[in-house]
Structure formats: structure tokens, C-alpha cells
Image (tube, coloured by chain):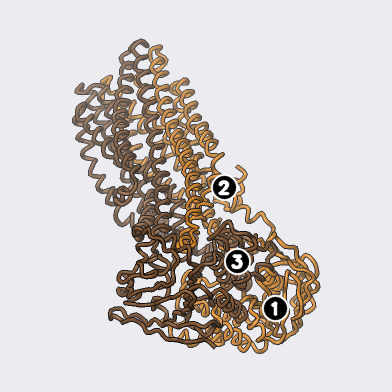
Amino acid sequence: MRALDRRLLARARSIRVALGVDVALGLAATGLLIAQAVIVATLVVVAFDGGRPGEVWPLLAALAVVVAARAALSGATETIGRHAACRVMSDLRLALVASRLTGGAPASPPDDEVGSGEIATAAVAGVDALEVYLARYLPQVVLSVTVPVAVLATALVLDPTSAAIMLVTLPVIPVFLALVGSSAGTRARERWEALARLSDHVLDVLRGMPTLRAYNRGDAQADLVAQSGERYRQGTMQVLRLSFLSGAVLDLAATLGTALVAVTVGVRLIGGGLTLRAGLVVLLLTPELYAPLRALGTLFHASTDGLAAAGRILDVLEAGSSPPAGEGDPGSWQLVELAGVTVEHPDRGGAALRDVDIELVRGEVVVLTGPSGAGKSTAAALLLGLRRPDAGAVLVDGRDLATLDVREWRRRIGWLPQRPTMFRGTVRENIALGDPAASAERVAAAAELAGVGDVVAELPRGYDTVIGPGGRGLSAGEQRRIALARALLPEPELLVLDEPFAHLDRESTVVVARAIARVAPGRAVLVIDHDAQLLTVPHRTVELPRVPATQPVHSVAAVAAVAP
Amino acid sequence: MSTLAGLLRLTRPPLGRLALAVTLGAVAVLTGVGLMTLAGYLISRCAEQPPVLSLTVAIVGVRAFGISRPIARYAYRLVSHDLALRSLAGTRAAAVRSLAGRLPDRTGTDRDGDLLSRLVGDVDAVQDLYLRGLIPPLVALASGAVSVTVAAVLLPAAGVVLAAGLVAGGVLVPMLAAALTRSTASRRVTVRAELTTELVDVLRGAPELVVLGADGAAVERIERLDAEVTRLGRRDARAGGMIEGLSVLVAGLTTAGVLAVSVWATADHRLDRVLVAALTLLAAAAFEAVAPLPPAALTLRATLESARRVLEIGATPPSVSDPAHPVPPPGAGPVVLDAVGLEPQDADGWGLHDVDLTLTPGDRVALVGRSGSGKTTLAELLVRFLDPDAGRVLVAGTDARELAQHAVRQRISLDGQDAYLFATSIRENVRLARPDAEEGAVEEALRRARLGEWMSGLPQGADTLVGEDGAAVSGGERRRLALARALLADAPVLVLDEPTAHVDRPTATELVQDVLAAAPDRTVLLITHREDEARLTERVMRLRRGRITPG
């Protein structure tokens, strides 16, 4: 079994508090359990010996107090554990957001949508699963140690023979643990995966339903889903037959142990070697020897989801780290350059960029070309301060960008990413993302400039149309032009356009090329594209060669070119 | 309650199995009760030091209960899980069947498949309803009745106390649990969904937010939602703790109460003293049956909500239905939209107004319009995913509403912009258009879609898996696969909705040229927003704000 995830422990202080409280509450609960058995046995013996009601009242009052205390303890354990779960998940969520936003340097292009959705779901729904772990499983770990020890100790004091019987039945516990941990456990997990696959299959069918319907295959698929559900049931039942055995083994130990203790205690009572009170206490406690472990096994399976959710987020957190930002004011700059920069690419075992020099002067348009994988987008990330070079520097008028206030620097930049994101919100909100206070006129002007004004005008709700996840779908070309409007709106001094012509038809390409020509004067523009032919402004072309995995490549030659 | 009844109607659990599961569950509880009751009696009786032989029955009984309880419990768990899995399979198939007549969803509320994935989760939750919401209460009812009867026979007062305790623990506490979570349940779902959406936005678009300086606002929104989620979670935690504590309290006090009345009854000689321990242990063991009910009640609302959403699918009328007596499919002839109108479903759409369009056999027509102009709606009318609110769709002179749906779709094939690739092989993805097609026909369709060369480069050829939603193939190949599918279907009319939506410009032109060349004898309607593609056809129509204009 996996113990507490150390990374989780290291990150969330509230877990340590919860753990300490769990141990304390577990010890108290164990004591109360023994006390309850003793009081109940004493009451029975008082009645057995024909005791008067006068003797009974204080005992009953004591029993009520113990019961109330046990109730309070279990309520508190549950509440504290679940509170901790909420706190841990909140901490993890905020840390996740902080690492993505202030970590500054997502090593790779933004995560694909599926991955982001999965992590976000884990970060929100994971709290339910983590509750089981913190509020039930962890306290149960404590109880599954303290309770059997306390029961055995009590039995040893009151009736060593029964203690011996308990000890004989105890070896079932390792057998039980083996069953939980070994093949049965693995196969149970396989079944969960099979269930996940089956759900994926149903989702696959539902998502493709319009296609199936178009080919008259909808009803036939329903039959196939029913068949695969039936196959899943048969396979799962086969596994359950085995994995429920672990519970059955513990049940058998508990009931046979109880029966054995009852019979042998009875025989010794007849012989007069034991008091009824001692016998009863032992009988009451025998089932408790096994109950905590029985519960632990069940909870272990229920809490693996929560640990997986937390682990998923911790993986993401470990990937990002944030270099401290400088404080210098970039001021009114004229020249930005990548000076001998190298960026390592750990995933590929080589460099994304090696010893590259690129100069960019205000008033100049530079087109960066090169085969895919040559590091064009990485060069853009360096200019944006989203990444720091592993060697060399990004210089703004000769000053290292690392020493400058990067937020101030970015205020001067407009960026069209290779895969722009449409955020959930209106078209207006999406365009005015960098300046939410921008007037409707400025938003419309930016949209017109980017060649998306007509498109928006054709939507029934115009700029108030909700786009992004769950909103109206826009074509890839329309999305790029909205992102271009977004980049142009703040009237930046440096424009970084990563494939501005991708997914555009011929007419839109002309519009975008015209927009670039219009904004270029007085600004520095870096256009990343395979095909510089589309630009109508005079420009300089810089070609990045493909970076081989190991061999160093020397700085690239700048090729001067003038557009027709 | 009505949700549960509806679900039972939908999934039709075999009643015999349900009865078997409940019986086994009750037997599992009652053998435990029997074991502890008899053990208590045995020990007390032994303290009176009787002849050992007089105890034989009790000793045998204790052993018999001890052995039969684990067996009964094991069988109970197997049978109840089997029942839940059966009903899960039934619910799944029923959900797919009812959605088969309702997708694509014209309201467009599920543009990202988000609702669908939630629906699959909802269907899976049905399993939980059986295992936690239906079978355990019935087990508690059956075993509780027996336990109370036995206690009442031994001592009526003990029976009364036990009955009161079981009702409190098995009915009142669960009701309280349901009431405590009622107010937060729906709010919780909404806030969590909002938080998830915001998180997805930030995770996907972090670099853009950072560069635009919009990260502060995003963090603020997330912090606010996170605080709300945490607050609701803590409220639920307090409710959970309270319910947990109350359950322990009710069980403990009931045992104490039974013990108290037994002690007094012994003093009054109404009860044999050897039965005090027996009754006390009986009461404690009987609570095993009600223990699962309060925690189940805490989550019951969410589970019922899931079940309700599953049932809702079947409750909404399908967008189209087959006529009672379909007209036999007509012969060859034109497809005509005759003054067709369709009201917009929401403020995001224009609907369609007075649309006339004639496709005579062999026509090559392009329909050009921007996003939102109603192009896809028009395509869906042609294959009768929708019926018009005004005007008629005529297939060779017959109103499409008088034809069976499959007859319309055998004549008119739609290769939609959302043409979907299933997580199976290339071959199966194409073959679904005509399952009885011969191997040669599938290969021929792939070849005509100009995928022959690409496929021969794949190690497994046509048996290569395409991944989840075609993740393993490029945008261009994906479109060509959809095209191969449409070619295999061999319908005389081919409607292509944005066939180049996710393809680069040079590829797009080539693709459209290939489509037109691959189906030389068919009627083709090419729906697109790209002017340069439209020019490749013989006739261009324009759709603007739901109205058609010749181009």
C-alpha cells in the first residue's frame, strides 16, 4: 500500500495538523471503546447478580457519557479530515494557478485542451476523493494499529487464554493484506480501468452520434454498447469474486474468532476459572480486533482516486519554477536582440536554440523562417520573457531583460501565439483582454484592423456573442484574427506574430498582410512564418536552421530581402 | 422518489435478483445478530455452571452462525454488484438509444462535448444508486424487522427501544442528512463547474494572460470561486461530521437503552438474567444494517440529480420522428428546399428564412456564408436531422417528412464539419458508412479519397488505430477519411459541410478539387466560408443572416 504522499505532506501544512489530531483522536477513541465494553459488561453482571437499580444508575450515566464522547470524537474526526481536504485542495489549486501564471516560463507550448481539462477537473472534483483519504482512511490507519493492540492487551490482562486464541487467528491479517495488495488488488484496478475505457467508448459513440446517424448506424451502436456493457459485467464479476475474498477472509476470522472465544470462555466459566465480567468484556472486544482492518481495506480502494488527483497536480507544480524578476524600467527602447542565446530542450535531449543572434530595431519588420522544430516559437518566448535562455541573453538597448521589470516590458508587446486561446467570454472581452477598460470603438477598430470586423458583424449578437469553451464555435482563421485584434488593441511597440496567416483563406490573408503593413511604422515587428511571400511590407528575413540533437550550430546568417 | 421509480422503469432490474440480493444482505446481518445474541446467552448461561451437555445446541448455533455469516456476506456483495452492473449496462444502452434520435443537439449547448461527458458520468452514477440508495435500505428494513421481532419476543420493552433506535438511525438521521445537503447541492455543482472552466482557461491560456497583463484579474476570479467552493465544502464537512456523530450516538444510546430496560426487567423478574447480555449484543449487532444509510443520504441528492439528467434525455421529444406509414423511397430526382424557414433556437443564431435551393442530379453547388449564417442548419435540414418550421424539403418530389429517416439518408449523405473519427481502426471508421461493404469497396473509397499512398506508408495500413477522436491523424487525413466514408456510402447526393475547416490553405484547395473529382457522377453541395474554394464549383449561392442569395 502507498503511504502518505510525501510531496503532499511537504506542501500542505494543514495535513500535518490533521495527522496529529487524527492520532490523538484515534487514541482517545480506542480508550473509549475499551471503557464502553467494561461498563456494558459490568452492567450485565450487576443485573445477573440481582443488583438493585441504585447501583445501575451511575453505570448507565457513565455509559451515556462514553457513548456521547465517542459520537463527538467520530464527528470531529470526520469534520476535521474533510476541512483539511478542502484546505489542501484549495492550496493546491491556488499553487497550480500561481505556478502557471507567475512561473513565467511554460517550457512547452500551452498544454493541449484535453490535458488542461483533465487537470482542472482533478483540481476541483479531486476534493471529494481526497476527503475519503483524509477524513476516513488516515484516521483508520491509526485505529487499525491502536485498536487491535488495545484489545489484545485488555484480553491479556483479563483472560490470557482468549488473548492466545486471538493471536492464533491474527495470521489471517497478513493473508488479507496480501490479498488486498497483490493480484486481486491489481486486477481490481484493471477493472476500474476497464470501466474508464467503457465510459470512453460510450462517450466516443455519443460524440460521434451525428456521424452515426448520418449513416443510419445510431441504433446499431446502442446494441453494441449493451453488448460491451455485458462483457464488462462478466469480466468484473470474475474479478470481484476474487477481490471480495479478502473481505470474506477477515469476516471469517472475525466470526470464527468470536465463536471460538465465546465457546472457550463459556467452558472456563463452567469450570469457574473466569469471571462473567471478564468473559463478557473479552467477547465484546473480539469483533473489534478485525473491524478496523476490514474498514481500512475498503477505504484504501476508495481513497486512491484522491491521491491520484493530488499527485496529478503535484506533478504539474514540480514542472514549473519561477526565476526572480528584475526591477529595471525598460524605458523608451530602440533595439531588442537575442545575443548568442541557447535554450536547452530536456525532452529532446538537445537544444531548442543554439547560439542564436537576432536583432530587431524599432521601425523594422523581421520575418523568422525555418523548418518546424528550429526553435522559432522558442525565440518568441525569449523576447516575451516567458523563457530565459540557458546561455546568452535577451538585450533591450544592451540591458539584460533578466534585470528589467518583465511586466513593464510585456506592456510594450503585442503577441499572436501559434495557437491562440479563446477564453470563455464575449468577443469584446476576448479582444479587450489586455485592456478591459477599452472603449467599444477601440475594440471595433482593432477588430477591423485585424480583418475580423465583418465576421463579428454577421453574428446576431455581434461583439456580445459568447465564445470560448462552451460558447459559439469560430473557425480557426476567425480565432486567429480575433487574437490578432487582441494583440493590436494596446498599440504595442513590439509585435510578435507567430504564423499570422495560418488557417486564413486568400482574402483574409490579404487583409492581415495589409494590417501588418499599417501598424509596422514606428514599431518593431517579428513575424514567424514559413512563407514570407505573403508580406507586403519591406522586411528582412532571418532563417533558423534545424538544430541537430547534439552538434552545435553557429549563429545564423541574416538574409536581406525586400518584398515586391 | 419519482426519479428512483423512473430509473427502475428505465433499467428494469430483474426483480428476482433484487429479492435475492436483499435476502442475502438481510441474512448476512442477521447471522451476525444471531452470533452475538447466542454468544451473549451462552456466556451468561455458562456462568450459572449448568451441565455442559445442556449447552450443545447453543454451541453448535454459535459455530453455525460464525461460519454462515462470512459466506452470506460474500454472496450478498457479489449478487448486489452483479445487479448494479446489469442495470448500469441497461441504463447505458437506453441512454445511447434515446440520444440516437436527438443528436446533433440543435440548441448548441454542447459545443465542446462537455454535457456528453457529464452524461456518461451520470450514467455511471446509476450504479451507485443501486449499491447505496436502493439495496441497503431494503436490507435494513428486512433485517431490522426480524431483529425487532426477536427482541420483542424476549422482552417487549427491548423491542420497542430497538425499533425506536433503528428508526432514528435508519430514517431520521438519513432524512436530516438529506435536508442538510439539500440547500448546498445545486450551488455546489454550479460553483464547481465555474471554477473548472476558469481553471481550464488559465491552464490553457496562461502565457497570453501573462503577456497581456490580464493574469491578476484571472487570479482574482479563481480566488473568489475557490473561496466559495471551499466554504461550501466546509459546510458539507460540518454536516458530514454531525451526521457521523449522530449515527454513533443513536447506535450507542439504543444499546444502552436496551441494556437499561433489560436490567430493570431482570430486577422485576420479567426477564431471565441470562438474556440481558443476549439482548444487549442483539441491539448492537442490529445496527450494522442501518450504518450505511446516513452516509448514503449525504450524497443521495447528487446521485438522484445524475439519474434525473439521464431520465430527462428520454423525456424531451426527438427533433424528428418517422411517419407512421412512410412513403416508399422515390426514384431519382432533384432535392429541393421550397421556401424553407426555421426559427432560431437562441440569440446566437439567425435561423433560416424563405430559403429556396434546388439541387438537380449532377449539380456542383457551393454555399458560402460566414460563421453563424445558418450553413450547418441548412445541411441538417437536408439529411432530416431537423424538420423546417415553414416550407418543405422535397426529395425527388416527396416531402422528406413522409419518408423514413433512413430512406432520406440513403439518398443524401452528410459529411459534417464535426465528422467524427471513432477510436478504432481506419478501416472500421470508413466501413461504418456501409457495414456490409466488401473489403475491395473500402479500399477503393480510401484510394479515391487519395489516402492510398498515406496508408501504404503506415506499418499497419488500414488497420492502424486513429486514437481518441482521431488524435493520431492530421487534420488533412482526417478530412480525407471522412470523405472516404461519404464515398463508400454511395448516396447520389453528397453534402459537405466545411470539409476544410481544420486544414491549411494549399491542402484545402487540393482537397476540394479531389472531392469533386472523386464523385464525378454525384450531386455535390459544398458548404464553406472560403471564397477561393467556392470558386471551384459550377454555381455559388450565398447564405447571409439565414437568407439565401445567388452569388
Identify the residue under disc 1.
B367
Q: Is residue A60 left or right of residue B111?
A: left
Label 2 and label 1 in one chain: yes
Q: Which sits in the foreground, A323 or A137? A: A323
Identify the residue under disc 2.
B305
Inter-mark Cα distance, 2 to 1: 43 Å
Q: Is residue B93 above or below residue B280?
A: below
Amino acid type of disc 3?
Gly
> Disc 3 vs disc 2: which is toward the camera?
3
Kindly identify the residue that appears in the image at 52 percent across and 33 percent down: B176
Q: What x and y, as percent, mark residue B150?
A: 45, 28
Q: Which chain is orange?
A: B
Q: What x and y, as percent, mark residue B407?
A: 70, 74
Give the drawing colour for chain A.
Answer: brown
Identify the residue under disc 3.
A473
Q: Is residue A280 above or below residue A90?
A: above
Inter-mark Cα distance, 3 to 2: 29 Å
Kindly identify the residue that appears in the image at 24 percent across and 32 percent down: A150
Q: Chain of mark 3?
A: A
Does the image show residue B247? yes
Kindly identify the residue that appears in the image at 63 percent across and 83 percent down: B533
Q: Is residue B121 left or right of residue B324?
A: left
